[in-house]
Amino acid sequence: MIKRLNFLTLISILLLLSTHLWSQTTKILDEIMLEDYTIQVVFYDPYLNLIEQTPEFEKLDSLRQLEIWDEYLLNNVIFDFQLTQNEKILKHYILKGNPSKTVEKLNLPRNTIYELDIVNHQSNVNYYNASDYQEYISLKIDKLNFYGTLFDKMELIEEMISSGQRLIAYNLFGRHRLPIQYNTVQYSVLGIIADDLYGVIPEEMIAKDEELYNNKFFDYQQCISEYYQIDRIEKIYIRRYNSDGTIQDEFPRIEITMDIKSNLNKMSGILGVTTLPCFHSSDTAILISTTDTTNVYSIKTNNNKAVDKYLQEIIVTKNKNNEISKIEAKRLIHASSIQGDFVIKENYMACFKRFDNKCVLPYLLLSSEIDDKNFDRPKSVIELDYLFYRK
């Protein structure tokens, strides 16, 4: 922890420097010493590389330039932070476009279109070509806290700044675009390197396999992907009861989960999993009963570690419109005592309804003692509401 704090302090000092260690035309922007590590920052100027690949780019009309520039950003490497020790490259922290994202035309701050590949070094690999290093990726980060579709270290932008044209946004390649400051990229990436070396990279920053959660039976998983972001408001009531069943004490609190998609099946907490159980594409539903208005299914999971840790005996009820109306299960509470670790089982039920005239999502969560199957005395009541941000 102390090493990480010292590292972040070093980063802050570096950000105060107004001069660059290298020539403006070089691809090497920085060489940062950290104990016995060296971090060399390589910048692949997207404009220069695009011109080299598409010489006619400057002569194209603005609409065509817009398409080509956006496509280039989403599919190419921009920075390579190379971690070296004793003159041997250990890892690459490669900042590139995320091809699954879309460049926003009007809402510029939404252009968080980048991802960071953490790649184990191999010789004879061209790290500018993402396809060449795919098999050596150890981790992918897709939650980065900067946005824009230009970079202040681009030769084109530096020339404009030198001529007195320092702007908040530049009208280039078919639209106004925000430049990303190198200091912002540097601080963000070096913070991830510090976590990787001396701590743990936060789970919510790590990219999830989109196809892994593509299970059509649980249609709410596909629905949330159709939004730019969904935030969840959780009104939580923890209750204790008198012997006659009346409420003795109630402990309310409110929590907010930002961007529920990035928190799918987060292993670090039971609330994150059970407020929106997320099922793998390999998890299966087996029809066990049917009526005129409902179909009831038993769920068989397949190495779904998050769900398996907190839920067992999962039963899903769908209505006549084939929409999920509730999920019932045994919820597992993991605890410890001086005798060791143990697990407590309790009843769990998630009730669903339609939100935003589109997504069917949980609106009520109940838990109860294992013998209270009808939830007459729920131990916890969680009311859920959502804020939807459209793409």
Image (cartoon, grey):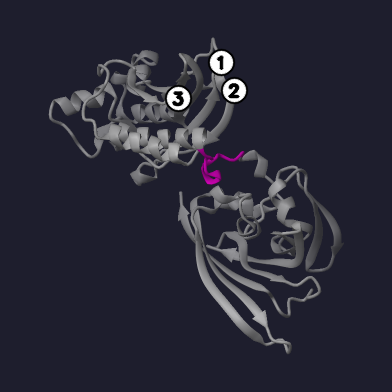
Tag 3 residue:
76
Which of label 2 and label 3 is nearer to you? Answer: 2
Marks 2 and 1: CB-CB under 8 Å? Answer: yes
Task: Determine the residue positioned at 45% across, 13% down.
Answer: 87
Marks 3 and 1: CB-CB under 8 Å? Answer: no
Note whether 297 is above or below 281 in the view shown.
below
User: Is residue 168 in view from this perspective?
Assistant: yes
Q: Which mark is residue 140?
A: none
Q: Secondary structure at mark 1?
A: loop
Tag 2 residue:
136
Q: Secondary structure at mark 2?
A: helix
For this rendering, which residue is in front, 237 or 333? Answer: 333
Task: Determine the residue positioned at 64% across, 85% down.
Answer: 247
Note whether 148 is above or below 319 in the view shown.
above
In percent of width and height, residue 387 lies at 48, 61
Q: Earlier in the sequence, mark 3 or mark 1?
A: 3
Residue type at tag 2: Tyr
Task: Determine the residue positioned at 44% across, 22% down.
Answer: 36
Which of label 3 and label 1 is nearer to you? Answer: 1
What are the residue bounds of the magenta stretch?
199-209
User: Is residue 317 in view from this perspective?
Assistant: no
